[in-house]
Amino acid sequence: MKKNIFWSVGLVIVLCGIFSAHEFDSRYGRSINGDGKAYYAYLPAIFIYQDPTFSFIDEVELKYYPTDKSQFKDFRNKQKNGKYVNKTFPGLSLLYAPFFFLSMLVAWVGGFAVDGYSAPFQWGIAFSHVVYYFIGLRFLLSVFRRLKIRDSVSYLVFIGLIFGTNSWYYLVYDHSVSHIHNFFLATVFIWLLLNWIQTKRMQYIGWSGIVLSLLIITRPTNGLMLLFLPLLTMLSGRQLKDLIAKEYLQVKRLIPYLIIGLIIFSIPFLLWKWQSDLWLVYSYNEEGFNFKNPHFFEFLFSYQKGWFVWNPLLFLCIIASGFYFVKKSFGQFISFFLPLTLVVYVLSSWWCWTYGAGFGQRPMIDFLPFIAIGVALFLNEFKRINFTYFVVLPFCVLSLIQSYQITNSILNGGTTIKEQYWSHFLQLKRDAPSVIVSPNWKLVDQKVLNSVQKIDKSHPFSQSIKTRELKSVNIVVLSIEINSYTRKPDLRLVLSNQDGTLYKDVYITEFISTSATQMEFKIEIPDLKDQILTYYVWNGDSSTEAEITKMEMTCYK
């Protein structure tokens, strides 16, 4: 009964998180976003548009995403012959495919646009993360049972994985990357290897090779998972040399699996040929690894994006795993830490070692199953583990809060410094933007509007503030006090001049709350002469409702 409660409650909590975090009908709430647009684009390109140039993404951006292009992602990289290829590998599209085809059916039956990006497709990609992650946990449970780990330990580890690491962030908030799906593939890979090691049945090693091919064409660095094979053999009480002996490893029986694996492995080459007439390209162009200058320490310990700083529970898991393995044998200790060190070395050598914005070191999610095995074996040594909940749960709360902070721009993933981290520690309210006026700025004009105004679907524009005719100005500070009860309100401050040669808009969606918030924005403009400037608020003709209590425009030279 307790086991069923875990799966039911865990699934409900994750789904509630997704429903609360996303508005799939909003231009700002799409699940297919960021790098996910590139991973996903193979499917509509092949099955809907038959377009190897991906030219359809320009129309899709106008139809479904913010018109200010704040979420625009051009993933087409030019090759030497002048043609373009999708920069990402296609493995994730294979995992998306069942949900893509189901979404096509739902869109067709439900009267939605069957264009690959309407609501059913956005929902389908979001739910694929949940399905694959929980199936991955089921495989990991089977792995634990093969290693004779108690279920009570397994479910404690699962709680830590879901809520105490950055898995939660990429399950709920950010569906733009491949790591949740890689987590699933890694658990299947481990399960197959353990079955092969413990049963000596050839189909398991065959299928593990197929899964490894899929791992590699999803994210090539996943090939490093094979380095953990010696550890798995030791945990099963076997030796690797015995497993690859001629009398045991029957190569002829592996030929069908090798053919399937090679077909999967050939998919990127076939797609490169389809896109660019080239069989082999480096689709990332100038992006690559610098193995001579890895950011090893920063990758692990920096406030900017340190793996252990943003996931301290995993630091404890690594320490616990080390205690367990060194107690068992030096060989197990080396077989765990040497591959893990090489993984960190390779990943920290990537040109962008922070891997952009987001929560923590996201590529390490792919390798969490191996770390989970270590900490589960450590906890399994204790007859009672109830006391560990007092350790795990506070870290889960911390991870959930920091996921919320990153999502709501309270902290900026990838650029956070030590002072920002601690000054905003556990803070749930976003700082409103402000402007520091330089002593070198000369005040030219200032207008204030102190009156309560309502913006809604019937009244999409606020009252406007107009300056006198200005002789010279090149810096304008727009100030507003506003609140809204609409989730993710579509609001912008607009600055324009009389003849329309100047039009600047500032989107303020991420800073608005239900309580009145004061915010300021600096806008630099061309040096204008003999112009009247106008400042107003617009909801983009959406259903956004808001209340404005004060507007102010200050002009400087």
Image: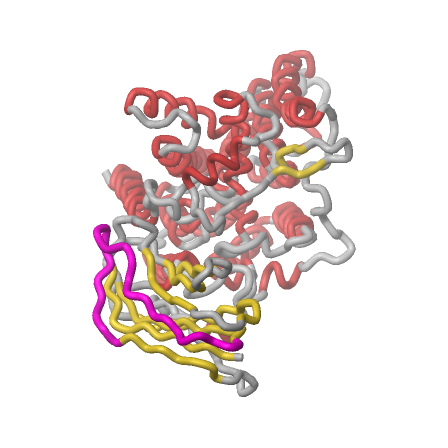
Q: Would residue 396 appear left or right of 270 to someone viewing this image? A: left
Q: What residue is shown at x 51% (from left), y 33% (from top)?
A: 40
Q: What residue is shown at x 60% (from left), y 21% (from top)?
A: 206
Tell me: residue 153, above or below residue 87: below
Question: What residue span does the magenta drawing correspond to?
Answer: 450-472
Residue farthest along the bottom direction in this orientation: 439
Tell me: residue 50, above or below residue 150: above
Q: Is residue 391 visible?
A: no
Q: What residue is shown at x 25% (from left), y 71% (from top)?
A: 549
Asked whether 460 falls inside the magenta stretch, the response is yes
Residue 92 location, x and y as percent?
53, 32
Q: Is residue 436 visible?
A: yes
Quadrant that contains the N terminus: top left
Q: Would residue 76 appear left or right of 501 to someone viewing this image? A: right
Asked whether 539 falls inside the magenta stretch, the response is no
Quadrant that contains the C terminus: bottom right
